[in-house]
Amino acid sequence: MAEQSRKMQHLRRMADRVVLITGGGGGIAQGISRAFADEGARLILTDLYPEGMEKTKKMLEDDYGAEVLTVIADGYNEDDVKNALQAGIDRFGKINVIINNAQASASGKTLIEHSKEDFDIAIHSGLYAAFNYMKYGFPYLKETEGSVINFASGAGISGNPGQSSYAAAKEGIRGLSRVAAAEWGPYNINVNVICPLVMTDKLAVWGRENPEMFEKNLHSIPLGRYGDAEKDIGKVCIFLASYDAKYVSGDTLFVQGGSGMKP
């Protein structure tokens, strides 16, 4: 009986939380959503494209009985962001956690091949979106003493060739996050960043097309595998959104199987 009680308590760690996840139709967001739904959270998913979000919503409702709100929103558009946040408040009455996961980019082009339009894609979908959701989400996070989890990338830290705009957006998000952590600490809002290494559908396709390079990359990971969006990335998000992590703020967590070791 005691063991069952502890298990139920564990499964409900996020039962009092409302979590907004941007880019909610993507594979990483789906894994993160599953992790939060498994812990009892209510979810707000935002994305430009409804198909992926609705698929994720149905999966979360069917598998977990989760309460899920989907909102079509462009993170670069301030009115869209305000509408998404207000829709969440109208539905659930509060927002505890904002996870800025959305990002598009013209990866694969060298810096000099990038056009201004290519650069704008990354900055608008990633950096501006994170800025807008944080800026306009602040009043709600202040009320709940909530958490922000932003996503960056080893591409920016290591300077991956072919990812100049993506790297710039992700490093901009890291700088923005550190400033927010400093400014919002007095309100007991913690802000952190995750740099993930995670298996996605796109990575799987690339691996089939480039098997030798895929294996080389795989062998460079000390734990010998790519991360799982739900079990690895999602569980770290759960920790950062929990009361256990309220004293963690302004940090970047490298969830990369040991490949992101830093001094």
Image: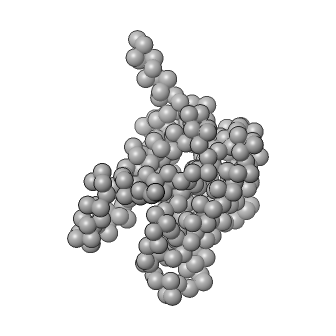
Residue 98, image x, y percentages: 62, 48
User: Residue drawn 41% across and 58% down?
Assistant: 260
Left or right: where does residue 46 sit relative to residue 29? right
Residue 238, image x, y percentages: 51, 40
Left or right: where does residue 115 sit relative to residue 185? left
Front residue of 56/209: it is 209
Left or right: where does residue 207 sit relative to residue 118? left
Residue 62, image x, y percentages: 44, 38
**Among all residues in the image, which is located at the extreme top?**
1
Q: Can the viewer see residue 165 in this picture?
A: yes
Front residue of 29/55: it is 29
**Residue 119 sits in which quadrant?**
bottom right
**Residue 171 sits in which quadrant?**
bottom right
Quadrant occupied by the N terminus: top left
Q: Can the viewer see residue 141 in this picture?
A: no
Residue 147, image x, y percentages: 63, 44
**Among all residues in the image, which is located at the extreme bottom?**
112
What colour scheme has been applied to the protein in the rendered image? one colour
